[in-house]
Image (tube, rainbow, N blue to C red):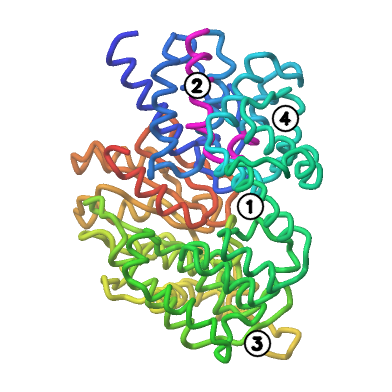
Amino acid sequence: MANSVEEESLEKLKQWLILYRDDGAYKVISKTFSREKALCVTQLLADGHGKEVLSQIQRYSSSAALIDREPLLFAYALCCKSTDKNTKKQAEQLCDKICKTPCDLFQLFKFHNNLSTTKSWGRYFKRLISTWYHNQDPYQLARNVSKEISFLGWSHRDALRMGHLKPKTDEMDLIFKYLVLGLAETKKSFGKSDKESIQKLLEFLSAVDIAKHKEDVLQVAKLVEFHSLKKDHLRTVLLKEKEIWTALLKEMTIQEILENIGQLANIGYLDEGFDGSQSVVDKLMNEALLKEQNVQPFEVIIASNYYKEGRKKGITWQHNDKVIRALDFALDYTSKGNLKPTGKRCVVAIRIGINRNKSTVRGTMTLSTTAAAAGVAMVITRGEENADVVFFTDTVTPLTVTKETKLTDMQNDIKEQVKKANKKEEDDQEPEVGDDGEEADIFVGVPPEPCDLVAPIQWATSQKKDVDVFILVTDANKSTGSKNLGEAIAQYRKDRNLPNTKLVTIGLTNSNMKFANLEDQNMLDVSGFDAKVPKVIQTFLSEAY
């Protein structure tokens, strides 16, 4: 393989691992994997470049640039199924370094079985699984396997049974017995051992067993604190108890707090009258922690919208103004302090249609499309020195957005533009009345306004704007314009002499966006939206991952 061709192939592999494109789009949910969709991997393996492929997989397995682990694990599974002995040998040695958690391992099981003609495991795969278990520190392994017991229909018991794993040390023998036979039988075999490492393992696994089976709240809370147990170590019923969360919160990251904010609110932990709520407020307003843990704005936006909405499956909670102020502080700080600018000249173009302040995006059901679009605009504006925000239908309206613009102000501005875009149709419609006698959402029943995805590009051309990246955010599944989006961006590059201008099209409610030219590496479609998408965009804009 010529060097230039090899470099191009490795570049495609890098993009595939980081920005996995399923049918041309980065999909937030419903990703599918096959040999046909991984041609950049299979071709490199077929050409004898397994070493280079595994090197890239290992590199990105620990990289902060990695967005989803599934593409990387599928590529690794392909290496494990390679016909090249050297590739397979190297893959075997890297199993514990690439499969970081039990869930990674179970994902590998799924991919391996999908790629196999038989469901039985050969000697090679049994050795590989043995490597994963035996190459880890026994105590850390015990923590991991007791927390992540099963995933995707697989369990550790399945792995030990199908892999016919034989323990190489007393510590591994103890862990394997625990996973297959349970704690009682394990104590019978190892309870009288005088080895300190064995007693330490038994003490920890005994604590886990109590946490998984007992309902004594104070006892479990003490065990959580003493052994640093995690949420997944506990039985579900205990997660309704405030004492348990007080113990968990001592070592929870801010991201974990944001992910669990609905559950905390639901049990009254965030109520103004409960002392524990102050510990959550303090963490959310701790600048050092926000910086150290690299909390991202959209993690805060999603949690904040969920909390402020004030309900979960029919259960409502009262808002604590201190919590709301803390969330607002965290959003303001992270959007100014934790964003890494790309230095690109950006245009964020938003088209949100009817009834959108009640609709949610695909992939983040707690986030409205209006909030998602406003969030993208705010994040780009605060992160980049040169950014324009516009609203478009078949025409373009520039919006006034600065680094100080609040998310709520941005949302209100977008809603106002939607009203204006639909004004003519509204005038022709009788107001609809809801079940409660109130006037229904002002956009209900109004025909959707045009969505010409080419309009922002034409606007930039007419304004003689030099743009490095266009980010189109829409809830439409098609463009109503007569011009092809790929042709329009190609023409813009030619007219402005900017051959590398990029185009990202985000379909907030779409399952499969198909606007990007698959041969154009500077075009990216995104189907759906979640907290990872801003990172997808930033990675796509970066020159190197």
Between disc 1 and disc 3, the foreground one is 1
Between disc 3 and disc 4, the foreground one is 4
Question: Is residue 537 at all visible to an observer of this figure?
Answer: yes
> Label 3 amino acid?
Glu
- List x then y, in percent, for residue 278: 48, 83
Question: Is residue 430 at all visible to an observer of this figure?
Answer: no
User: Does the CB distance between marks 2 and 4 fall below 8 Å?
Assistant: no
At x 48% / y 42%, what residue is drawn?
Answer: 515
Does residue 101 sit above or below 275 in this rendering? Answer: above
> Label 2 amino acid?
Gln
Closer to the chain start, of discs 3 and 2, is 2
**What secondary structure is marked by label 2?**
helix
What residue is pinned by disc 1? 204
Does residue 280 sit above or below 199 in this rendering? Answer: below
At x 76% / y 38%, what residue is drawn?
Answer: 189
Closer to the chain start, of discs 1 and 4, is 4
> Label 1 amino acid?
Phe
What residue is pinned by disc 2? 93
User: Does the CB distance between marks 1 and 3 fall below 8 Å?
Assistant: no
What residue is pinned by disc 4? 160
Is residue 449 or residue 165 the one in the foreground? 165
Looking at the rendering, the stretch of residues picked out in magenta corresponds to 85-107
Locate the C terminus and report the quarter of the image it occupies.
Answer: top left
